[in-house]
Amino acid sequence: MNRNNKVISSLILTSSLFLAACGGSSSNNGSATRLTEEDFNNQSFVVKGNEQVADSFTFFNKNKTGTEFIGDFKDKPFSVNPMTWDIKDNKSLNVAFNGGSGGYSFFREVVEKNIYTGRKNGKPSYLRKLLPLKLQDLDGKIFKFDLSGLASADNPRGCISRTLKVVKNKAYLKEVCNKDTPKNILVHENVAMHSEFSNTVKFSFLAPNNKDSILLSLISGDFNTSAEVVLVYQGRFKAVQIEKMKMVKKEAF
């Protein structure tokens, strides 16, 4: 090997080590751009909203159907959208809504842990695959939500403290708020893994006249320290919200 080739090889090796040290992904290659049905079969993904897109939660069923929950965004209200999907030429995920009247295509470029980085209809997009979650991960624990980053629309009662306690198949949501009721406790009488959506816990009520429910899934972190979760509210209050919470020893009150 001549001197120039040695210099080039050294630069390539140094660059690779630098990327690894900085958390760079070795998946930025052909394997990352290749998509298969197994990437999405019975999996759920979350998109964290910004000034261009809304928060969303999407479940991909193995039978090529699925459900997408879209949060409030600008003048568009919360919506639940049935869909179909497929993988074309192992290159793109194609989603169609309402019998094909709308949808999108996603091309993956990089895989980093549970994050698929790519382009959705030509624009940068980050699909976060839900992390594994079992009901036992929540049982017997108390979690405090970080309310500091919530917009006023997502915290209409001006709550300053909110905790969630899970005991087997029951959950106790306690809030201390500035508006309406200063202290409030909400008991979810049925806590179970969702019958269809993978890695998702459903909080609901047994009373036939109460149709409110909340879906909870893990995006990052863990339930022994701190976690980032997605919450899908269905019922009188409808929303898709991404929130942070940490395990604590005491409830809100």
Image (cartoon, rainbow, N blue to C red):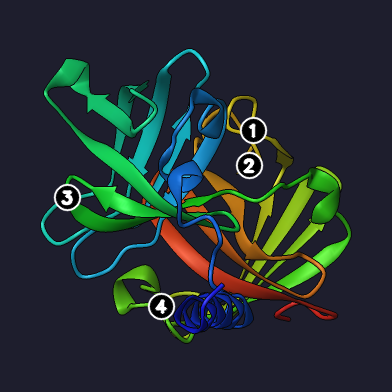
What's the mark number on residue 150? 4
- Distance from label 4 to label 1 (Cα)? 26 Å
Q: Would you identify the image quadrant in which residue 21 lies?
A: bottom right
Viewer-side residue, 247 vs 162: 247
Q: Earlier in the sequence, mark 1 or mark 2?
A: 1
Q: Earlier in the sequence, mark 4 or mark 3?
A: 3
- Count the marks: how many? 4
* Residue position marked by numbered label 2 in the rendering: 200
- 123 lies left or right of 24: left
- Distance from label 2 to label 3 (Cα)? 30 Å
Q: Is residue 10 above or below residue 212?
A: below
10 Å neighbourhood of mark 2: few (<14), some, or many (≥20)? Answer: many
What's the mark number on residue 112? none
10 Å neighbourhood of mark 3: few (<14), some, or many (≥20)? Answer: few
- Residue type indicated by callout 1: His
Q: Earlier in the sequence, mark 2 or mark 4?
A: 4
